[in-house]
Image (spheres, rainbow, N blue to C red):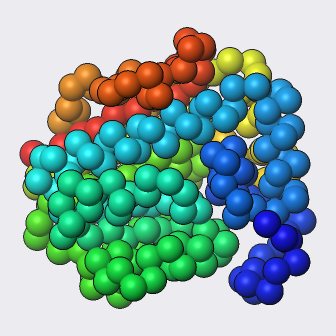
């Protein structure tokens, strides 16, 4: 894409890389700037499997959403949805049940702008610009209230998001707020970088993102990530390496066992 196009939302600093736009670039998307592509290229230089890791996380999203929809969930809240790419949540969910409703949330104005373009004309899908660390701004928003019924099960997605919340910001209390807002029968899907399995190349990438991207990536242990589910009941196979959560074909798993274990993933159900 051209970095000088007039659609760029006001206030976007095109000189600073964005995690959402770097992720879009690694997935083969076109909604990114030169600085994001430079960061993505450096990530690949340090960790040649960076694109594979992004693809595996996206594959987990597809499997988790389809699983929830097949359990009867008809409404989804995707926090940190990023820039629209192939197999978005509403596409996967509505393939199972056309009546599914989805609210996408991201703080990146470029992600929000493109999300709005993608879902224009689909009255069952909404896009909200908000920060995951301010749950009330999400849960009490007009768009959430328009599309989601908190008396019925909801599928909440937080994929590759909680590792951006530092320990000092108390991510456990943050997740408690989200869990408490969900009605019985709801599902929660989380993927999170794993401290036990992170290879040196991946740590070099996150260190660089921390220095230039305005954020901090916190890798966590299996027990720390599992705690984010609170009293939700983890569905089989539990919290596992993200490529090992109910894979359905070769595209869900990398040939390299190290990239398969870079992150944990799981889905829990609220009793």
User: Between residues 208 and 229, which one lies in front from this camera angle?
Assistant: 208
The residue lying at 75 percent from left, 80 percent from top is 8
> Visible in this render: residue 58?
yes
The residue lying at 83 percent from left, 27 percent from top is 46
Locate residue 34, reporting x and y percent: 87, 59
Instruction: Left or right? Give the position of 229 relative to 262.
Output: left
Which image quadrant: the N terminus?
bottom right
- In the depicted structure, whether residue 170 falls above or below residue 202: below
Q: How many marks?
A: 0
The residue lying at 75 percent from left, 61 percent from top is 32
User: Between residues 271 and 70, which one lies in front from this camera angle?
Assistant: 70
The residue lying at 21 percent from left, 26 percent from top is 236
Which image quadrant: the C terminus?
top left
- In the depicted structure, whether residue 118 falls above or below residue 79: below
Locate residue 130, reporting x and y percent: 52, 73
Location of residue 14 by image quarter: bottom right
> Visible in this render: residue 131?
no
Instruction: Left or right? Give the position of 32 relative to 176.
Output: right
Locate residue 23, reporting x and y percent: 66, 49
Locate residue 49, reporting x and y percent: 69, 26
């Amino acid at each position: 894409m051209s970095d000088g196009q007039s659609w760029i939302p006001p206030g976007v600093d095109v000189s600073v890389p964005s995690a959402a736009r770097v992720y879009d670039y690694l997935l083969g998307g076109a909604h990114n700037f030169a600085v994001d592509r430079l960061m993505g290229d450096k990530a690949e230089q340090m960790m040649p499997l960076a694109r594979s890791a992004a693809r595996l996380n996206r594959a987990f999203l597809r499997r988790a959403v389809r699983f929830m929809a097949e359990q009867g969930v008809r409404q989804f809240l995707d926090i940190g949805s990023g820039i629209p790419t192939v197999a978005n949540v509403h596409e996967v969910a509505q393939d199972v049940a056309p009546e599914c409703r989805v609210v996408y949330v991201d703080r990146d104005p470029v992600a929000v702008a493109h999300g709005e373009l993608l879902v224009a004309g689909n009255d069952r899908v909404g896009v909200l610009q908000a920060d995951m660390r301010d749950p009330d701004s999400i849960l009490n928003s007009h768009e959430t209230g328009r599309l989601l019924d908190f008396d019925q099960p909801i599928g909440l997605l937080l994929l590759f998001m909680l590792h951006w919340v530092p320990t000092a910001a108390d991510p456990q209390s943050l997740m408690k707020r989200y869990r408490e807002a969900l009605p019985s029968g709801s599902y929660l899907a989380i993927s999170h970088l794993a401290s036990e399995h992170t290879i040196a190349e991946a740590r070099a990438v996150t260190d660089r993102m921390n220095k230039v991207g305005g954020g901090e990536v916190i890798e966590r242990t299996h027990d720390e990530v599992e705690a984010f589910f609170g009293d939700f009941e983890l569905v089989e196979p539990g919290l596992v390496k993200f490529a090992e959560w109910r894979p359905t074909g070769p595209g869900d798993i990398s040939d390299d066992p190290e990239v398969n274990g870079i992150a944990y993933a799981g889905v829990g159900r609220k009793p």
